[in-house]
Amino acid sequence: MGFDVDFIRNDFPILQRTVGSYPLAYLDSANTSQKPSAVVEAIEDHYLNHNANVARAMHTLGAEATAAYEGGREAVARFIGAAQPAEVIFTKNASEALNLCAHTLTGGLGEGDEIVVSVMEHHSNIVPWQLACERTGATLRWFDVTEDGRLDLAKAEAEGLINERTKIVSVTWVSNVLGTVNPVTELAALAHRVGATMVLDASQAVPQLPTDVTTLGADLVAFTGHKMVGPTGIGVLWGRYDLLAELPPFLGGGEMIEIVRMTGSTFAAPPHRFEAGTPPIAQAVGLGAAAGYLQAVGMERVAAHEQEITRYALEGLQSIDGLRILGPTEPVDRGGAVSFTLRAGSTDVHPHDIAQFLDARGVAVRGGHHCARPLHERFGIQSSTRASFYLYTAKREIDQLVDALLYTQKFFS
């Protein structure tokens, strides 16, 4: 069965909008994805018919809410191939999930220990580790990238980047700027060879790629709901259960406890140990619906469409003189985010100007450093424009993007 993008688009009412006199071409899915009716309706039904708090409520609504919340956890566990639902922890976003890792994994670190990240990371996978190094005295080191936007594995090996002092390796699976798909299984093997824990930021990967956490190699995997057609306000941390059971709590409060006395407390088993307070109940319901929606479409088909639409976009963008693509220019080991700079004659057009001119012609893109300022500095630029695609992106939207960029370029030249 072929991938019928127009059939898919019917599930996303917002894509029928116009911006001024132009049809909306939403090319900002790496920032947040649009939501199908099935997800919105699942959240609406929960609030209208089953709303209550979870866990201790002894009434019918409480039991229904608890079942719905844990049902969302089970749906996410199936979606990523987790061995059991208890390996799925709900957070408010991927940033909180990565902060959870940076707090709970680093208690025993000290001077001489090292944490390894990469220069292509989102700030959410840099700043928590910087703070952890400040607390513990550990040293932060990082992978560089090649000129074509791949991790510089040869340089890392020559420098002995991962060594007996390495305690944690935390990298992105798919870059939110370059689109690069990193060899995470190989990196996990390098980390485990020296006894280090492997943390993976999969925020851009889980929405696009078939995911099986049991074979991926990472020990902890963070991602977010709103990039995988789910609601905002919920993220996920998956971890090997034996590792989760060893980690201390991240936040204190209700639901994460076993027994509380004034002289001290004991804590619940995972996942509830890491879910203090009232959790994102309706969001978990919506995320479960999102996982079910993507499974029904088929993640292999989503990935194939992503690759095809990215290939079409790379060809179209490279037809524009003065446009420079950051990262791989071929759709090989590449996700659906394409960042670029644009010259008009002798003028470098600012990404914010590009974004505004494109928006005036119905095209929604992102302008800035995309929470990856060190990566932009590595390439000698302050910011870039990013177009990003998903299962609902149509080729005519890419054509609309190219036409709008040519219009912008002509204006500034």
Image (cartoon, helix red, strand yellow):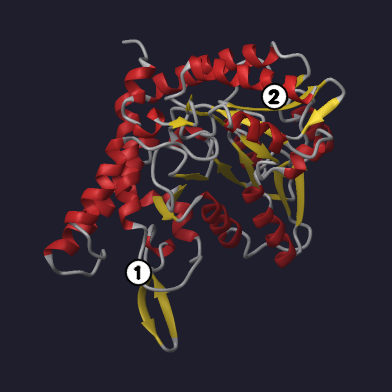
Mark 2 Cα within 10 Å, few/some/many (few <14, many 20+)? many
Give how far across and how far down residue 155 sits, in percent. Answer: 81, 31
The correct choice, above or below, for 254 with respect to 17 in the image is below
The residue positioned farthest toward the front in the image shown: 21
Is there any visible trace of residue 78 in the rendered image?
Answer: no
Question: Label 1 to label 2, Cα distance in Å?
Answer: 54 Å
Residue placed most toward the observer, 189 or 395: 395
Residue under the image location 78 percent in, 33 percent down: 157
Against 164, residue 60 (above or below) is below
For the residues bearing labels 1 and 2, Cβ distance under 8 angstroms:
no
Nearer to us of marks 1 and 2 is 2
Front position in the image: 143 or 227: 227
| Picture quadrant of residue 149 | top right
Q: How many marks?
A: 2
Q: Which residue is mark 1?
A: 255
Classify mark 1: residues with Cα within 10 Å, few (<14), some (14-19) or many (20+): some
Outermost residue toward the bottom in this view = 262
Residue drawn at point x = 43 percent, y = 25 percent: 391
Residue pictured at 72% horizontal, 30% vertical = 151
Q: In terms of image quadrants, where is residue 201?
A: top right
- Tell me the amino acid under the disc marked 2: Thr
Left or right, 259 with reference to 215: left
Instruction: Return the disc, 1 or 2, that comes first in the chain's sequence.
Output: 1
Residue occupied by mark 2: 408
Q: Is residue 292 above or below residue 147?
A: below
Q: Residue furthest right?
A: 346
Q: Quadrant of the N terminus?
A: top left
Q: Is residue 96 left or right of residue 82?
A: right
Q: Amino acid at mark 1?
A: Glu
